[in-house]
Amino acid sequence: MPEHDEFLSFLDEGKAAPVPPAANKGRPWQVLIVDDDPDVHTTTEFALGDVIIQDRHLEFLHAYSSIEALQLLRQEPQIAVILLDVVMETEDAGLRIIHAIREELRLTHTRIILRTGQPGHAPEIDTINRYDINDYKTKNELVRKKLYTTLTTAIRCYDQLRRLEASRRGLEQIIAASNQFIVEQGLQTFAEGVIAQIAGFAGIEPEGLVCVAAHPTTGAVDDLIPDPHPVITAATGRYRNLIRHHLEEIDDSRIVEHLTRCLIERRSLLDEHSLTLFFTGHEGYDFAAFVDSAGPLCEVDQHLLEVFCINIALCADNVVLVSRLRNQAFVDSLVHLPNRTAFIHTIDQRLKEDQCDQQIIALIDVDQFAEINDMLGHQYGDRLLCAIARRLEQPPLDRCLVARIGGDKFGVFGENRLVQPQILQPIFATPFSAECVEHSVSVSIGFAQFNACPSACGTELLKDASIALKHAKSSGFGQVAYYSDAIRTETRERTRLLNDLRHAFDHDHLFIVYQPQLSLHSGAVIGVESLIRWRTEDGRFVPPDRFIPIAERSGLIVSLGNWVLRTALHALARLRTAGLDQLRMAVNVSAVQFRQPQFPQIVQEALSDTGAHAEDLELEITESVAALGFDYVEKLLRQLKTTGIGVAIDDFGTGFSSLSYLDRLPADRLKIDKSFVWALDSQQPGQRIAEIVIELGRKLGMNVLAEGVETAAQATLLRDLGCDDAQGYYFGKPMLLEDLLSWLSARGKEQQP
């Protein structure tokens, strides 16, 4: 009998009785018949067309060659079983198809049943194992009952493999969720993993949604209700468009009813057509998952789902905890905006994705915010920052990344057309209201444009914006500045100068000179002022007005100032040894030094170590110390004066302190700035200021000393106006200590009778 006649012999056993339509639940199992004999296709489908396996019909697909089979498999990746003829157009055609299925198409779940009418072409055992062949039969063995048994076994195996794969993917998503950096992504990924797990248990497609609601908090047990606005946090398949919607916005009454009941009754609901599972949350929220089902679950699967719900609830708590930790790491707790870390992280991500073309950073600083805190209190300052944050979130900046960088600084990152002075400055034009107090706010803004530099990153861009902001603030309040090549060059020069200054300090290239101070009435030398100088290795001098501001901004001035103080006191000891015990030593003190809490202790230790007397030391401060606060400065000066140290106000008239502030300071001396002295015998503005300062000093009971006296006419005018003392090139230039000793010795001889 021909091969196909032997195959047809199973028809004699008769077909199974038809099954009622209700038994056909779910999508049919796809079975691919691959054979070059059309009769084999016809008889196989005729014999098994009404067979139902695991409550699902069979759907037959047909291929008559290797090429057709592979084309179908590429188009239909969910074929459950392949009935494959070993010998078709060539003797090894079937085995080559198997290789392509497993190695190229990577269809590892699809079951393969080999059929042949030529037993001599049976595959080797190694081949069966290597390619995961489910079964091998000769065609004369495949009577109807044997084929049904073989097909049922293969389909069950396929179903189990797919469920395991779905479960594995769900677990991977759940685990991955706890490692997400962004809260929303973490919770969403976790919820999608839950849907995949449930679908894996039910053997269905992962289509469903997860709804989150707050814990019920009011009333008796019968009155417990969930959050009136539960939110869909994850949705897959045909429900994907429902994500982030409130439950009441869903127009499918069946889903709304099941999820609402599940959350109210706080238990899972299983019926013939859906699974609605309840998960208890211990971090303030419960959630429920809804998945369509093709049929009721067996008792074993129901038990597994109960265990799954218990364990997944614990996992959900971990995800919420991680999300909260990420929230603390990336969100500013006061104004509820992204913080500096999140700002830089987001920019770095956009740089990696090449999404920063035509983007710019603006760094916004509230002018005189420290003064606002001092006057109105920190609570008011916090409320003002929150009000600023809310205003920055409004259109058009709602399309930008807005963050609190720290303190009173806010960052904005977005398109050039949005992040511009003409858009940002009007935001602050309307006064802010906090605690029933309206306050007009001025801001300084620094801008940094993204460029295509390969090393560009969020940190560097923010640094550039910060440099531009400093440049803007140096021009006054309410100014803006863009980071540019010129600013970059200036910044690099300051950085180079700072590095050189550190090197000079470490290698003794800095030194002190001393300028005499004389009485305008007696002509006697009453003291000297110590002045720092810097000579580079190649002999060039760097002016103090260039390196002192850099030392102050970098904090190096603290170490420099301590060194100057000790060096000057050692020089004072030399002067006393030389018999010049009536001279005082004036030492300049920066506001940066002055705000050090241990400054009085540093001065006392320097006096003790050098053997100098406190009465011979005078500390010169500028009016800039007013920025440290009236009470702080007054208290510190009185503490110093109780030890006998003198205090002088340097460069008076060039700062911003008030007369009432000056009256409160326990100062001994006012020093008239040299610019007012130079105006005395000229037609320049300010020639009357010296006269006013001298009169003011007299009224306040302070000694007055004029700086920068260069001519005899200036000295005479100052003396006639009542000025007490003076210093300047007319009397003596700043000198090294040895030169000063020689100068004092020579002057002493000149004054001898």
Image (spheres, rainbow, N blue to C red):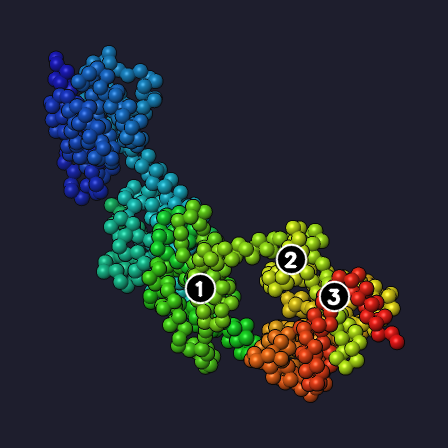
Please state, as top left, top right, bottom left or bottom right, where the N terminus lies in the image: top left
- In this orientation, which residue lies closer to the viewer: 435 or 85? 435
Question: In which image quadrant can residue 212 be found?
Answer: bottom left
Indicate whether 451 appears above or below 45. Answer: below
Give the residue number, with chain letter if any, for mark 1: 481
Q: Are marks 1 and 3 in contact (CB under 8 Å)?
A: no
What amino acid is labelled 2 in the image?
Answer: Phe
Question: Residue drawn 33% across and 53% down?
Answer: 234
What amino acid is labelled 3 in the image?
Answer: Tyr
Question: Residue drawn 34% across and 63% down?
Answer: 418
Q: Is residue 339 visible?
A: no
Indicate whether 728 appears above or below 522. Answer: above
| First reached walking from the N terminus: tag 2 or tag 3 | 3
Give the residue number, with chain letter if any, for mark 2: 541
Percent x, y of residue 70: 21, 28
Q: Is residue 432 left or right of residue 722?
A: left
Give the residue number, with chain letter if any, for mark 3: 514
Question: In which image quadrant can residue 400 be found?
Answer: bottom left
Which secondary structure, mark 2? Answer: strand
- In this orientation, which residue lies closer to the viewer: 386 or 135? 386
Mark 3 residue crowding within 10 angstroms, few (<14) / some (14–19) / many (20+): many
Disc 1 vs disc 3: which is toward the camera? 3
Give me the C-alpha separation between circle 1 and circle 2: 32 Å
Percent x, y of residue 192: 35, 49
Give me the C-alpha separation between circle 1 and circle 3: 41 Å
Which secondary structure, mark 3? Answer: strand
Mark 2 residue crowding within 10 angstroms, few (<14) / some (14–19) / many (20+): few
Question: In which image quadrant can residue 224 be found?
Answer: bottom left
Disc 1 vs disc 2: which is toward the camera? 2
